[in-house]
Image (tube, grey):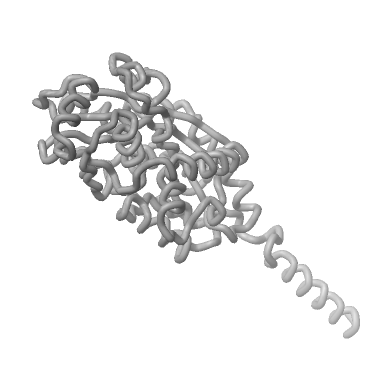
Amino acid sequence: MSRVVKCSWVAALALALALCFSVGGVAQAEYPDKPVSMIVTYSPGGATDFQARIVTMLAGKKDLLGQPIVIINKPGAGGQVGWNWFVQKGSKDGYTIASYNVPHFIAQSIIYKTKYNINTFEPVANWGADPAVLIVPKDSPFNNVKEFVAYAKKNPGKITVSGAGMYVGHHIATLQLMKAAGIKLTYIPEKGGVPAMQSVIAGKVKAGFNNLSDSFRNKDRVKILAVADLERNSFLPDVPTFKEQGVNVDNSSVNYRGVILPKGVPAGVITKLSTVFPKMFGAKKTLKKMKASGSPVKIMTRDEVIKMFKERETYLKGLLSGLKKK
């Protein structure tokens, strides 16, 4: 082999190798080639955490993501601690994803100087829509909203109401109830749905707003007085809505849950995850476990979530401007 031919062959091989291992090259490891971390901004055992583990349990299947998803809890300030961390420190290679909660993160971005808003996230897909419900301890004298409101009117501020944080769905439902019924309540923000539920069960507060799914799992330990939605829920068919009981509280506090990426993630990663996640959420095994836990499912695609984020932000700006801030 002549020197010229040999040099040409070496150069061609080097060029081929460079192309193979360049970004997007055919020999580049296919995403994902290792486990993916999912940030849940609420306490372990709460509805978001509980459901996140269910809807991602099939991630390791080869026909889905092909790698497991590891849940990492970063609770605090109604989700602000975790979402601020995610935006500032989460990796942008597709190996750090997070759960979102609406209206929570959108309302917080309107009220506070958060590092996040609807433009700092890349939506992937939505898995559920969980209404807020008004609950009281099992031995509470309140059996319906009428009795609850009557007491609150005679005793302004004496009814303490727990919730999962500030300007989460529970807080918004509390603000709506106060305005609609003309009463004053004392809202007690907790570090997530679990401690908020425990406060009600233990009688540390007179009432609470919590997720329907959490309340469904604890229905033998609390009384559920009303659903903050436009219609009754099939998981709690005997529990009336607020509107049925004469109080104008709508579905503004319904908790939409899904998955997001930070801005800056490669387009190929967004495409892959936004294709895989709706399939994973809708798998028979996933739906069966969600139903058994009283967790309402609402699967939405990336485009549908983008639209929902924009609509919710516009709506919440108007709603929050008309509610008395705590």
The location of residue 236, given as percent across then percent down, is 31, 19
Q: Quarter of the image holding residue 212?
A: top left
Is residue 90 in view from this perspective?
yes
Q: Quadrant of the N terminus?
A: bottom right
Residue 188 to residue 6: above or below: above
Q: Tell me the residue at 68%/64% (across/down).
A: 23
Q: Between residues 178 and 55, which one lies in front from this camera angle?
A: 178
Q: Tell me the residue at 42%/43% (across/down).
A: 320
Q: Is residue 98 left or right of residue 139?
A: right
The location of residue 228, given as percent across then percent down, is 35, 28
Is residue 289 in view from this perspective?
no
The location of residue 144, given as percent across then percent down, is 21, 20
Q: Residue furthest top?
A: 238
Q: Is residue 20 left or right of residue 300?
A: right
Q: Between residues 238 and 248, which one lies in front from this camera angle?
A: 248
Label count reads 0
The location of residue 177, given as percent across then percent down, is 31, 32
